[in-house]
Image: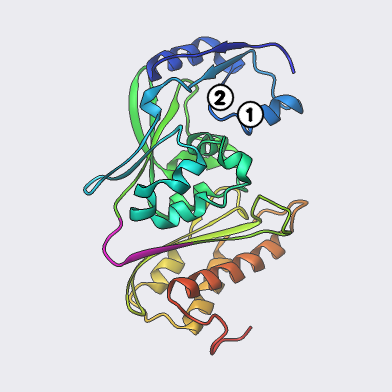
């Protein structure tokens, strides 16, 4: 690992100016779980690390009945999982955060850093996509707000400008009767990175689905909303057969990656299975009842 300068700005504007001054030689460090691995391998060799640990604007978790949930970019995954506000108002997000990677990463890594790294085989982006979340970006020039879909551009690529930071994540309040389930498939019990994940958020009246948001992650270059599947489900009484049809649409509409962890065909089948079970779980169904295995 090469020597580097370590800077500790006290504000978003100060950090932004440092990033602008150092250009490509600088990297932002928050929890550092991914960055330090890259520097040790060495995949990365920055001349300067800009620590955001002292920027209070990036801290905290709060909830407003009108605006929804605000999660500061420096909130650790463990903070999100344990937060009484998250658990009360967006329990699916707390459930997801409790399963990110492993205990070491959950207690060190931050949700903002996770989004900036844009690893396709991680949990928060897909869950936040299904929750219709937004990301607030800040710099010395001011702030702007992007949807998760706008923020995640491509494989390990985000819409962050070189002098910008992720400041906070905003999750709108869930309508009455809205529930969520986040499911993930691990190739082996020893793995911490999902091969496939499905986030499903639905407003239901008994077995009737009034509104649905479905996102697939880990198997695609970036998390993907499945709008044809959502339209198929809305206004339907959800049965095991409907869950199976929905899962087939989800599997058909994704463009899975193929790599050493799994072929595109294998990932597609795993997404289909996970999607079917996820819908069944939210609606309290026996996934096999009345449907072909």
Q: In this view, does 18 lie to the left or right of 259?
A: left
Above or below — where is 41 with respect to 264?
A: above
Q: How many neighbours does mark 1 have within 10 angstroms: few (below 14), some (14-19), or many (20 or more)?
A: some
Q: Do the residues labelled 1 and 2 touch (CB within 8 Å)?
A: yes
Q: Is residue 236 above or below residue 201?
A: below
Cα–Cα gap, marks 1 and 2: 7 Å
Residue 78 placed where, x, y %?
51, 43
On the question of residue 253 being in view, the answer is yes
Relative vertical location of residue 114 with respect to residue 197 in this rendering, above or below: above
Residue nearest the viewer, comparing 54 with 11: 54
Viewer-nearest residue: 218 or 92? 92
- Name above or below for residue 153 compared with residue 196: above
129 part of magenta stretch: no
Q: Which residue is drawn at 51% across and 69% down?
A: 278
SS at mark 2 in the image? strand
The structure residue drawn at horizontal position 75% and vertical position 18%, both measured from the top left corner, is 1
How many tags in the picture?
A: 2
Q: Position of residue 100 (x, y in %)?
A: 57, 48
Q: Residue 287's image quarter?
A: bottom right
- Whether residue 149 is visible, yes or no, is no
Secondary structure beneath disc 1? Answer: helix
Which residue corresponds to the image point at 50% horizontal and 16% vertical from the top-left?
Answer: 19
Residue 187 horizontal/vertical position (percent): 72, 59
| Residue wearing tag 1 | 35
Residue 29 shows which numbered tag?
2
Categorize mark 2 by other alpha carbons within 10 Å: few (<14), some (14-19), many (20+). Answer: many
Residue lying at the far bottom in this picture: please name it: 290
| Span highlighted in magenta in the image | 174-181
Earlier sequence position, callout 1 versus callout 2: 2
């Amino acid at each position: 690992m090469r020597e580097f300068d370590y800077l500790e700005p006290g504000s978003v504007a100060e950090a932004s100016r440092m990033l602008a001054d150092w250009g490509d030689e600088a990297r932002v460090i928050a929890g550092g779980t991914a960055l330090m691995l890259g520097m040790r391998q060495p995949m990365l060799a920055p001349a300067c690390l800009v620590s955001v640990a002292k920027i209070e604007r990036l801290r905290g978790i709060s909830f407003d009945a009108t605006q929804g949930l605000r999660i500061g970019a420096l909130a650790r995954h463990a903070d999100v999982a344990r937060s009484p506000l998250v658990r009360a108002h967006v329990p699916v997000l707390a459930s997801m955060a409790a399963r990110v990677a492993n205990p070491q990463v959950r207690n060190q890594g931050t949700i903002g850093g996770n989004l900036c790294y844009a690893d396709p085989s991680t949990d928060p982006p897909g869950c936040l996509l299904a929750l219709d979340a937004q990301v607030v970006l800040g710099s010395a020039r001011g702030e702007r707000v992007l949807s998760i879909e706008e923020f995640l551009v491509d494989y390990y690529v985000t819409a962050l400008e070189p002098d910008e930071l992720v400041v906070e994540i905003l999750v709108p309040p869930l309508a009455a009767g809205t529930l969520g389930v986040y499911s993930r498939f691990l190739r082996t019990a020893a793995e911490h990175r999902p091969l496939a994940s499905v986030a499903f958020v639905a407003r239901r009246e008994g077995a009737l689905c009034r509104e649905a948001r479905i996102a697939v992650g880990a198997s695609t270059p970036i998390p993907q909303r499945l709008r044809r599947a959502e339209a198929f489900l809305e206004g339907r009484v959800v049965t095991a057969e409907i869950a199976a049809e929905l899962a087939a649409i989800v599997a058909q509409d994704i463009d899975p990656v193929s790599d050493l962890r799994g072929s595109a065909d294998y990932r597609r089948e795993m997404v289909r299975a996970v999607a079917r079970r996820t819908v069944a779980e939210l609606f309290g169904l026996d996934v096999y009842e009345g449907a072909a295995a």
